[in-house]
Amino acid sequence: MRRGARFWLQLGFTVFVCLFLVVPVVMSVLAGVTENFFIGAKSGLTLRWIGEVWSLYANTVYLSIGIAVACLAVTLLLGVPAAYALARTQNRWARAFEELLVLPVAVPGLATALALILMYGQLRGFRASWTFILVGHVLFTLPFMVRSVLAVIDLQTLEDAAASLGASFRQRFFQVILPNAKPGILAGSLMVVTLSMGEFNITWMLHTPLTQTLPVGLADSYASMRLEIGSAYTIVFFFMIVPLLVALQFISDRVGQNK
Amino acid sequence: MTSDSVPIHLQSVGKTFADGTRALEPLQLDIAAGETLVLLGPSGCGKTTLLRIIAGLETPDAGGRVLFGDTDVSALPIERRNVGMVFQSYALFPNMNVAENIGYGLRVRSVDLTNREKKINELLALVQLEGYGERRIDQLSGGQRQRVALARALAVRPRALLLDEPLTALDAKLREQLRADIDRLLRSLSITSVYVTHDQSEAMALGDRVAVMESGRIAQIGTPREIYFRPRTAFVADFIGTMNRMRLAPGAAESLFRPEDTRVVAAGEAQFSGTIVSVFFLGDHTRLMVDCGSSQLLTVETTDRREFRQGEPLHLAVAREALLLL
Amino acid sequence: MAPAWLLAPAAAVFTAFWLLPIARLTTVGAGGPDGIAAYAAVVTNPAYFGSLVSTVLLSAGVTVATLVISGVAGMFLSRNKFPGRGLLTAMLTFPLAFPGVVVGFMVILLAGRQGLIGDITQWVFDERLVFAYSMAGLFVGYLYFSIPRVILTIMAAAEKLDPKLEEAARSLGASPWRVIVDVLVPGLKPALISAGAICFATSMGAFGTAFTLATRINVLPITIYTEFTNYANFATAASLSIVLGVLTWLVLNLARTFAGSTVAAAA
């Protein structure tokens, strides 16, 4: 098949856009393992920057992972039953609630964070704890979990069938509904973890020097550390987030296929 | 395999939905134990709603009562009515294999594993799916899924079997085949069954009695022969088979008669005449669409082997007994 | 109807940690020296108004540029099969999860003092071009996180277009350009609108990127942040952030009326 000029032009354009997105990533990875960015690759490759990043910011990595896992647990407990209830209830209160849940995502994180500080900032213990950040993350990620599960949990006919065979609500929920909602729950889980790991807008306002997450640490390093350290730290971030993204893409495709 | 069938009695059962739709006008219905009743009608007539009320998936409006035998089950949800239900989309659990699906009702009733397996095998044999126990649902064809759905519903020895358009999702050939299987099964089990369909040939073939429904009401209930030969309303007459309508004499009321009762005769014996508009040779008979001057074309079905041609004149007569009175 | 207690935990958490705090924020916003007029401050106060205008113009510009760029690239990728297509698609969507800060860093690497673009211009024109720490840098940054999202939306929508419509147009004699204008763009309109709205709303509310590049850039989220942290001006910060929130919510809602599905922003 002959490709016309239009094809090559468009291809060139697309490749250029790709480069725009990818080149800085590559640069950053290189910078993180180069002795001296200003001199370039000639100065030699090294892992010392990553080592320094770890000694400076290891706690941020642990905290981010911890919060992401906690966030996942909370959104599962809150979101899965909520999604089921929303799928079953067809009145406008349910629709209104769905709308409300999305607001922390539609509205800039700054507003949510300010609101939390103004309302609960006085509670010293809570304010200084990682749970304060967790709350922000849950508010932001819950709609994604709910939406993801909602897409697969409308299994009215299966439920009717189970009920016709005598199953109680608890039996139906755990033996029929949850197993068949697994793809959506999985997709939602990956989404929640990914979003929590990368959340900055809310977290920046809510954090304290003792509760710094990875993105917060990143901002700190970009502002105050040399480029190589910022880059090395970014490598650590990529390392954590890319597997999640790949898994998310894979699961989303699977969910899409099964529809 | 016997069942504990019950007669079903509905009293003043009506249904209005939350958004105001009136799905059923309050009606009365009696189904004998072991009888197969078919609810037949176009979409929106309320047949599925009625079935779901009998099942316990919907509650009737105030004043309506559903009785199984002597027990008033109106307040019981479906989990406690012990009915077997077969859905149009089969509703087989994708997370379980065939055997687990069939045995689900027994598992819920805490029947122990040995007895469960015994029962599952009995049912697999009954629906002619021996050896399919380990298969996953997505490995089954439409006809096989339908049989698993039946087996699952029967496993719990239900008091009544409720089927919601179980054959609609299948292609024509398979449908006929399975219709025969279902018919045989229902007769041998002599279980009270309520069968919903919009396909009138299915209704006539399967039902001991047929209830023709229209806009939330039962227009007529009777045996298939009664419904076909003695329709009581214009709606029933039109819905079952094809019906010709024509004024046989000027100024007279419209007469109703079936295409197969419209005989092709010689010009001298004709009651009325017309011109052939379309000819459909169907092998064992010919269907003719004839313009006799009335607003609708007449449908004539004849086994006359003559070759008919479009545009030819045609002479017709109808026996007095074949005219339907409403 | 499902048991109500299934919704209760989510509802309780949401009310306690978002509804009530936001309600309180609204009253704090009106509790400053200007009272409820603080809500109009975004238009009456010249500094804030300037900030709002810059933010809106920037967001609008980014939206248009993103729609065009992603439109061309997205349509191209979804309609042409060639070796390497999967790789290009992956590369284009991979920055999807980058937080604003990382995007800011990417812009610094491209256009900062040691940036690649500076190297190129130095080599060609003998002068380093550094624009990361200005509106131009912010523009590039916003493009960076908007393109992946919009491309995904467009590609998904392009998959759903019925090729028969285009075949019909071509059978009637339409040239490729006409097919694009008369069949493809109208077919993609809902997706374009919703993607455009998300892009706009995200840019309006984005904070991390601007924060990384410089806290002196005059966009509304930075203004709000400065009021809060540097001047402890709670009332103003509160009122401005409520106004910003309402604006983004309005844009997303309007888009939904045209696109017909739930639309939400995040960056």
Image (cartoon, rainbow, N blue to C red):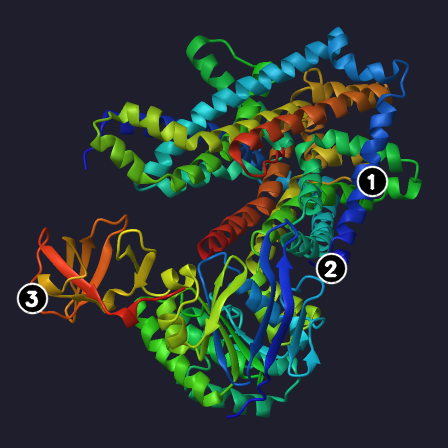
Mark 1 belongs to which amino acid?
Answer: Leu
Residue tagged 2: C3
- In the rendering, at what x and y percent does residue B127 appear? 42, 84
Mark 3 belongs to which amino acid?
Answer: Arg
- In the rendering, at what x and y percent does residue A198 appear? 65, 40
SS class of the residue under badge 3?
loop
Q: Chain of mark 2?
A: C
Please name the residue shown 26% across and 31% down the image.
C169
Q: Tell me how far mark 3 sits from mark 2, CA to CA.
A: 69 Å
Quadrant location of residue B234? bottom left
- A173 or A160, which lies in front? A160
Residue C13: tell me if it is visible. yes
Quadrant location of residue A46? top right
Q: Residue furthest top?
A: C46
Q: Return the mark for residue A210.
A: 1
Question: Does label 3 lie on the same chain as label 1?
Answer: no
SS class of the residue under badge 1?
loop
Question: Does label 2 lie on the same chain as label 3?
Answer: no
Is C261 placed above or below C28 here?
Answer: below
Mark 2 belongs to which amino acid?
Answer: Pro
Residue tagged 3: B306
Left or right, A109 with respect to A9, comes to: right
Residue A180: tell me if it is visible. no
Q: Quadrant of the N terminus of chain A?
A: top left
- In the rendering, at what x and y percent does residue C241 appear? 75, 24
